[in-house]
Amino acid sequence: MSNKITYTCLALFTALPLCLPAQPSPVTLATATVPTPVLQTHATNRQHHILSLPTQQTPKQKEEGFVTLFNGKNLDGWVGNKKDYKVADGLLVIEPVDNEERGNLYTKKEYSDFVFRFEFQLTPGANNGLGIRAPLEGDAAYTGMELQILDNTADMYKDLHEYQYHGSVYGVIPAEKGHLKPVGAWNQEEVTVKGNNIKVVLNGHTILEGSIASAIKDGTLDGKEHPGLKNKTGHIGFLGHGSVVKFKNIRIKDLGKK
């Protein structure tokens, strides 16, 4: 028995005509139903056909809660050495005038727990430091804490102890090396201090993360007394050591505010 099928040919935009059946074929074919893939949530038994991806913070969200500490115009909100530290072209610059010791530049306010962000540009052999929870007097590396700001690549520093290189809590916790940009380029750094815990992120890389209490449990690495490690609050400052260094985009999120 034969089944005749009548075709109607349509002229499309091609050289060959397209022939379609004018009537449905009386031959019935068996079909199989293919299940549609679905995603199951953990919270309910409801089914979803949309895959949710993790959202990323926008630049505005990343800066939420941060307050600018340097306005690019003057040193309002800062105390201390305003002779070597100055404002030039919207930047905070330390340019030591001579070898006279004039101290450091500190925030007028004190902070306990915080996230501190800034950018810095080193010159060859540059040596500076970030003082945290520090008093206005004394050596901040011992009366508070000092995070090194240093040109690790300078030949003059090749024989330093591991706890003296950039990002290290001086004398206490060493930082991982290898993430500074070439001298003359701008680096971005974020320092988070919360209780005994401290974290340093340099150019997107975590170079230090640890507990001060754990680090000094068996004594400090440099074998010296660091009474400032017990400070609960203090000033944040830039600690000059006779080198030219530039800073910008200095801001803070105060985690101690209630």
Image: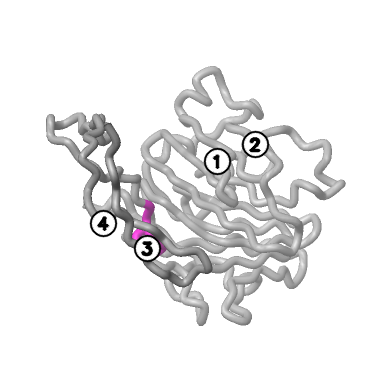
Residue under numbered circle 1? 206
Cα gap from disc 2 to disc 1, whole angstroms: 8 Å
Q: Quadrant of residue 94?
A: bottom right
Please state which of residues 44 and 191 is positioned toward the viewer in this rendering: 44
Q: Residue 158, position in %: x, y?
A: 83, 40
Q: Which mark is residue 22?
A: 4
Q: Is residue 58 magenta?
A: yes
Residue that mark 3 sits on: 9
Q: Earlier in the sequence, mark 4 or mark 2?
A: 4
2 and 188: which one is in front?
2
The residue nearer to you, when weighing 220 against 10, is: 10
Q: Callout 2, which amino acid?
A: Glu
| Callout 2 touching callout 1 (CB < 8 Å) | yes
Is label 3 or label 2 in front?
3
Q: Are marks 4 and 1 in contact (CB under 8 Å)?
A: no
**Amino acid type for the residue under numbered disc 3:** Cys
**How far, Cα to Cα, is label 4 from label 2?**
76 Å
Which residue of the protein is positioned furthest toward the top in this rendering?
218
Q: Tags 1 and 3 in contact by the CB under 8 Å rule?
A: no
Kindly report the distance in space between the C-alpha atoms of the residues bearing marks 4 and 3.
9 Å
Disc 4 to disc 1, how far (Cα)? Answer: 71 Å
Q: Which residue is mark 2?
A: 176
**Stretch in magenta:** 56-61
Check disc 3: other Cα within 10 Å, few if <14, some if 14-19, many if 20+: few
Which residue occupies the foreground of this view, 161 or 152? 152
Q: In the rendered structure, which disc, 4 or 3, sits on the residue that comes first in sequence?
A: 3
Alpha-carbon span between mark 1 and mark 3? 70 Å
Q: At numbered mark 4, what does the secondary structure look like: helix, strand or loop?
A: loop
- Mark closest to the chain's N terminus, 2 or 1: 2
Magenta residue check for 84:
no
